[in-house]
């Protein structure tokens, strides 16, 4: 349409004539379009950040430290584009923190043994300051502060937008009230106001309807007072029709949008834009509106079906989690008795917890209740387990102290050189070590190595000693061979006492010759005893008799205080008999602990020899006691 000039007075007159009929049609179309739009409830227009489509990030495999780093990185982005990712990070961090607080440090994979099966209690987590959680709370506080600042800024902007739109309404009222504007110039100003209106962002929700009604009222006033002609009005309606067709096409595209939530939010935006678009030709108003409603209804139906399906899934998830609670109650109904049973129960509950995490969400109203119930069962198990292993830990500490004492005794024995007695005492310590219970696995190997080192040191020194002694055994062998040859060649007379003294002298020299090689020891001993026994038999003198005869001779030759000597001798003989009996009992006990092996058989033979000698020595000492008694009784008769 050309710009109106003073020569266009005829056109203005014609407009006045046609406006009367056109105004009613225009007003009716405006009212119909406005009513149709207002009959459909429109949700609040989403915030700018809610419209943004965020990238999808899978945080399921992130550790708590990685989640903190991820949140810190997100805070460098626009706060309106990170809302979903922050929520996912927060939920994942809460799950990991809850899991960490409810179960101890990772139980060992290895099977329990005699010395490490009771050590699980040592690995139970202790309450410590959670620096990671503090860092997360600090970052999440910054995020909330940024969100609040953004929200406040948005609200302030909405107030500014309200003032701007109110100014445009006033400008539209001024335009409608002015009757001196030319038609094209007025339409240009009208279109400019409309464009500026659309460019202005959101306003406070509570002001939206009043603002919209005032705006439409001024539009109607503009058309009424400007008396625009049919062609201009039709052109504007055609433009509005094109815009609404485009909105219909966009709504129809949303029908196949995979994300129901994204489709619904986009539909809300289309509804807001539909409401801001002016009327269309009356004959196409219903058709275009029904087309838009048809697409919107399908999206709404998809949304209803989606939430119905979500409700069904959450109900099924609730049943599954209730079944896990029942299973956990069944598993913990009876308290375990052994360490293996405790560990098996812990593993079973851990498996239930893993399954729980794989199950989706449940209705919000029962979520806290069932989680508290399930978590309570697991927490009670870990409390009982902690108490059980605390008792075991006390026993392990007591065993550790016992083994430290055994180490100290073994280390003292390792410095001694009384090989026979020290060996017996060290073997007894080894027996006590085996009878002592297990210790904490962290110190078990260390304390064992300490005890073993002491034992190894002693036996190494003993081995070295006997190794050196073997160097002189060859010389001793030659000495004993010479003594044996001399004994065989010696001629005994008829004097019994002289013969006994001679035999005693050979025995003394034989004993003083020292040790001989083990291979010759038994042979020489048997040969020497055979010769001695043969001499005794030839002389009709027993070894026992020879010893007793020598003892009587010794008592006969006592000088000085004979009574005191006899008293001291009786006490000494009695103590020696008791000591031999004690040694005999110990050797007999030790024989029961020797396993069957070549080395053990040699040790058994040595013990048997010692025991036989002890029995013979006890019999001789008892004979000496009788000789003492006879001597005392003889002295009393003489008195």
Image: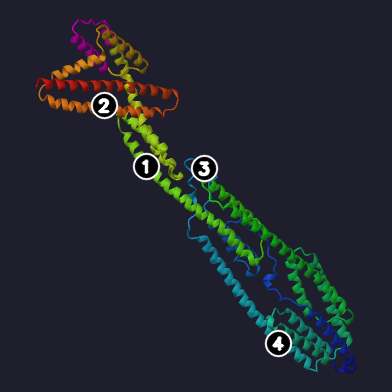
- Residue 473 lies left or right of residue 19; in this view the side is left
Q: Nearer the viewer, mark 2 or mark 1?
A: 2
Mark 3 or mark 2, whichever is nearer to me: 2
Q: Quadrant of the C terminus?
A: top left
Element type at mark 4 = helix
Q: Measuring 76% from the left and 72% from the top, which residue is drawn there?
A: 267
Q: Earlier in the sequence, mark 1 or mark 4?
A: 4
How far apart, in angstroms, are the residues tagged by discs 2 and 1?
35 Å
Which is nearer the N-term, disc 3 or disc 1? 3
Provide the secondary structure element on which disc 3 rests: loop
- Residue 319 falls inside the magenta stretch: no
| Distance in Å between CA atoms under marks 4 and 3 | 82 Å
Q: Give yes or no for contact between labels 4 and 3 (Cβ–Cβ under 8 Å).
A: no
Q: Is residue 173 above or below residue 70?
A: below
Circle nearer the N terminus (2, 1): 1
Q: Which residue is mark 4?
A: 167
Give x and y (percent) for residue 252: 82, 69
Residue 509 in view (yes/no): no
**Disc 2: which residue:** 577
């Amino acid at each position: 349409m050309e710009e109106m000039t003073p020569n266009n007075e005829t056109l203005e007159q014609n407009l006045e004539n046609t406006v009367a009929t056109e105004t009613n049609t225009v007003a009716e179309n405006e009212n119909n379009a406005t009513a149709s739009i207002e009959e459909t409830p429109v949700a609040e227009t989403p915030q700018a950040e809610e419209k943004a489509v965020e990238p999808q990030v899978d945080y399921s495999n992130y550790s708590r430290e990685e989640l903190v780093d991820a949140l810190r990185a997100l805070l460098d982005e626009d706060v309106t584009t990170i809302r979903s990712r922050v929520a996912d990070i927060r939920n994942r961090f809460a799950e990991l923190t809850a899991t960490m607080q409810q179960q101890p440090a990772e139980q060992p994979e290895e099977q329990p043994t005699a010395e490490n099966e009771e050590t699980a209690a040592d690995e139970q987590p202790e309450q410590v300051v959670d620096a990671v959680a503090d860092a997360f709370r600090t970052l999440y506080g910054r995020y909330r502060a940024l969100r609040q600042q953004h929200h406040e800024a948005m609200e302030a902007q909405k107030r500014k937008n309200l003032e701007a739109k109110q100014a445009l309404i006033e400008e539209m009222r001024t335009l409608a009230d002015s009757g001196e504007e030319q038609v094209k110039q007025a339409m240009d100003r009208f279109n400019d106001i409309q464009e500026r209106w659309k460019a202005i962002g959101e306003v406070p929700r509570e002001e939206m309807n009043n603002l919209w009604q005032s705006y439409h009222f001024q539009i109607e006033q503009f058309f009424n007072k400007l008396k625009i002609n049919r062609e201009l009005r039709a052109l504007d309606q055609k433009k509005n029709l094109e815009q609404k067709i485009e909105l219909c096409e966009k709504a129809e595209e949303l029908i196949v949008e995979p994300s129901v939530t994204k489709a619904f939010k986009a539909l809300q935006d289309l509804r807001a834009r539909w409401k801001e678009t002016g009327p269309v030709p009356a004959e196409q108003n219903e058709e275009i509106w029904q087309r838009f409603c048809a697409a919107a209804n399908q999206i709404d139906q998809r949304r209803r079906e989606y939430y119905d399906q979500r409700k069904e899934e959450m109900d099924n998830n609730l049943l599954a989690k209730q079944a896990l609670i029942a299973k956990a109650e069944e598993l913990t109904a009876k308290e375990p008795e052994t360490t293996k049973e405790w560990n098996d129960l812990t593993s079973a509950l851990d498996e239930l917890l893993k399954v729980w995490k794989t199950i989706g969400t449940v209705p919000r109203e029962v979520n806290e209740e069932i989680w508290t119930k399930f978590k309570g069962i697991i927490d009670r198990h870990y409390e009982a387990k902690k108490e059980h292993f605390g008792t075991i830990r006390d026993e392990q500490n007591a065993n550790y102290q016992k083994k430290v004492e055994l180490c100290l005794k073994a280390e003292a024995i390792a410095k001694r050189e009384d090989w026979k007695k020290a060996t017996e005492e060290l073997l007894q310590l080894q027996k006590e070590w085996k009878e002592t219970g297990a210790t904490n696995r962290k110190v078990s190997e260390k304390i064992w190595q300490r005890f073993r080192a002491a034992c190894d040191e002693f036996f190494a020194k003993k081995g070295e000693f006997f190794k050196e002694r073997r160097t002189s055994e060859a010389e001793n062998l030659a000495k004993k061979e010479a003594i044996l040859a001399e004994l065989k060649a010696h001629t005994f007379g008829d004097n019994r006492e002289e013969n006994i003294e001679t035999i005693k002298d050979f025995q003394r020299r034989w004993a003083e010759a020292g040790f001989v090689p083990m291979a010759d020891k038994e042979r020489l001993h048997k040969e020497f005893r055979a010769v001695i026994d043969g001499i005794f038999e030839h002389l009709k003198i027993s070894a026992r008799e020879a010893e007793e005869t020598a003892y009587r001779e010794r008592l006969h030759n006592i000088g000085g205080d004979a009574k005191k000597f006899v008293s001291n001798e009786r006490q000494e003989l009695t103590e020696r008999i008791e000591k031999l009996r004690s040694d005999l009992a110990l050797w007999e006990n030790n024989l029961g602990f020797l396993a069957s092996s070549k080395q053990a058989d040699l040790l058994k033979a040595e013990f048997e020899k010692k025991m036989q000698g002890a029995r013979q020595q006890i019999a001789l000492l008892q004979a000496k006691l009788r000789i003492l008694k006879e001597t005392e009784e003889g002295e009393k008769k003489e008195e």
